[in-house]
Amino acid sequence: MCLSDQVEEDYLQSAVSPNLTLHLVTEFIIFGFPSLQKYHIPLFCAFLFIYLFTVTGNGSIFFLVILDRHLHTPMYFFVGNLSFLDLSYTTVTIPKMLSKFSMHLDTISYAACFTQMYIFLSLAATECLLLTVMAYDRYVAICSPLHYPTIMTRRLYLLLTAMAWSCGCATPVPILILALKLPFCGPNIIHHYYCDHPPLLQLACTNTSFNVAVGSSIGAFILLVTFSLVVVSYIKIIITILNINTKEGRMKTFSTCASHFAVVNLFYLPLIFMYVRPTASYSSDVDSLVAMLYTVLTPMMNPVIYSFRNKEIKEAFKKKVHLK
């Protein structure tokens, strides 16, 4: 037995919850990054920096969009919603990781675990829908600039945003209801760094093939449909860009769209890997690493890609700093 396996086995034996019975699990143990347990201090420092950077960046953009009337446009309204989503995304997962790495607070109650799972899935579904709405907004702005003010009215972009949030919150409800009906009689160790649907299914004391099928079907519908719509929008945008007469205009518009599309891929592809597959999970290290891409890296990069490279956002930020 190698040293890392021995460390993991010792840790699991010492972490088994005293509230675990043969009939009922009252709490779960978060055991993310099995092969990196001995590096808890570097992991704490790294995730603390990422969390502070993400909260500061997304929080700044969110409040700038609210406070600066020059940013009260459809595009920045969507960007503000995206920043709030990313802020919520990281707050759902990273603080628990920080408490685990710093104070070894590994346990999470049964109710809190399922609440975390539902909120996370709701935010993920909402972000998929919001990114689709943002792609449509850019499509109208670039492909039909003269008709943009009449198409993207205040009523329409408020309606699209409300639909994204309401559908995002409703989508995981069947998954949650089915998961709550499963018996959990042990073990209670989640091989992931937050309560997610696939790792939870592995702990159920019954066959979960129906849950896997329902979760994969819902995930496939949301992810593949929204991703396809985003791809179609960007294809039409690229075709329009290629028809721009000036080289500088083509390069400027294309560089912005390319950056946005790169972030969209970074968000969607790992999600598709995690939730659109016939099995509940692969190795815990692989799942944790893949989940890092859309739970940590994408929310951290979105402020830079979507906003801090934007001239109007930078001017609004400088204006607010100058006034203070």
Image: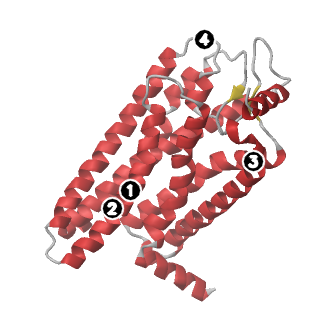
**Residue type at mark 4?**
Thr
Report if the CB atoms under discs 4 and 2 are less than 8 Å apart: no
Report if the CB atoms under discs 2 and 3 are less than 8 Å apart: no
Instruction: State how far apart marks 4 and 2 are (Cα).
Output: 46 Å
Q: Name the residue located 61 percent from the left edge and 32 percent from the top edge.
A: 284
Report if the CB atoms under discs 1 and 2 are less than 8 Å apart: yes
Q: Identify the residue under disc 4.
A: 206
- N-terminal of the pair, mark 4 or mark 1, is 4
Q: Nearer the viewer, residue 198 or 4?
A: 4
Query: Farthest bottom residue?
Result: 322
- Of badges 4 and 1, the one in the foreground is 1
Instruction: State how far apart marks 1 and 3 are (Cα).
Output: 31 Å
Q: Identify the residue under disc 1.
A: 262
Q: Name the residue located 36 percent from the left edge and 33 percent from the top edge.
A: 221
**Residue type at mark 1?**
Ala
Q: Identify the residue under disc 2.
A: 258
Instruction: State how far apart marks 2 and 3 are (Cα).
Output: 36 Å
Query: Farthest front residue?
Result: 2
Q: Which element is circle 2 on? A: helix
Compared with 211, 67 (above or below) is: below
Disc number at residue 39? 3
Please indicate whether residue 134 sits to the left or right of residue 292 in the image: left
Report if the CB atoms under discs 1 and 3 are less than 8 Å apart: no
**Residue type at mark 2?**
Ala
The image quadrant of residue 113 is top right
Q: Nearer the viewer, residue 35 or 180?
A: 35
Q: Which percent across, then down, holds residue 156?
A: 32, 56
